[in-house]
Image: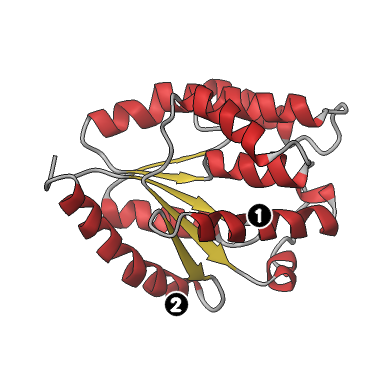
Amino acid sequence: MVAYIAFEGGEGSGKSTQAARLAERLDAVLTREPGGTELGGRLRSILLDADGFSLGSRAEALMMAADRAQHLDEVIGPALAAGRHVVSDRSAYSSLAYQGVGRGLGVDEIRALNDWATDDRWPDLVVLLDVSFSAASSRLERGLDRIERAGDAFHRLVAEAFTSLAAREPDRWLVVDGSGTIEEVERRLWAGLEPRLDSLALSRGGAQ
């Protein structure tokens, strides 16, 4: 059995670090959105450029979906077909939170866009690292990108959106306390995730 696992959370939640650690543990393909392909890298440079040109919310959503479509075609789909787990730093759920709620474009509208972009291929499991807003903000010590500069009100909406999304699909989401040391978070994450992987294998009839 192979699984497509995504890490979600607000800026500074620690998801990139934990995604890398889980990928190493599972010998999985580690990737990210946006930017997991050559096209995605170019889109990422535009999407996150803090000093670039103005980018409208709809254009932002469409560019994220374009990155995601290429990502599924070029990285995620082939890896799963080859029998490799995939661990991704962000997924289509980020668009539901950031563009659907944060930008006010509507969750249903952004879900429909990403259903089409991914051919209805959403993560099998989603890990949400739950970190207080103040703690996450304190971790952002480097120069902030365009989305990180969106303001506290925006990022609070995004955090609330992730919590709501996780509550709607409890069988797909694993919410992990992201406070403490990297090692402490990793232990909590694996304790919650390992049974989910076993359950997923059983639901699919065993290893593939």
From the viewer's perspective, tell me whether residue 53 is left or right of residue 172: right
Which image quadrant is residue 53 in? top right
Residue, x 72% and y 46% (percent of image)? 101
| Structural crowding at the residue carrying mark 2, measured as other residues with C-alpha within 10 Å and reported as few (<14), some (14–19) or many (≥20) | few
Residue, x 53% and y 45% (percent of image)? 90
Percent position of residue 125, x then y: 38, 51
Q: Is residue 65 visible?
A: yes
Q: Nearer the viewer, residue 189 or 39?
A: 189
Which element type, helix, strand or loop, lies under badge 1? helix
From the viewer's perspective, tell me whether residue 164 is left or right of residue 142: left
Pointer 1 or 2: first along the chain: 1
Q: Is residue 11 visible?
A: no
Q: Is residue 33 above or below residue 191?
A: above
Q: Is residue 136 above or below residue 114?
A: below
User: For the N terminus, which image quadrant?
Assistant: top left
Q: Is residue 125 above or below residue 82?
A: below
Residue indicated by mark 2: 184
Query: Amino acid under label 2?
Result: Glu
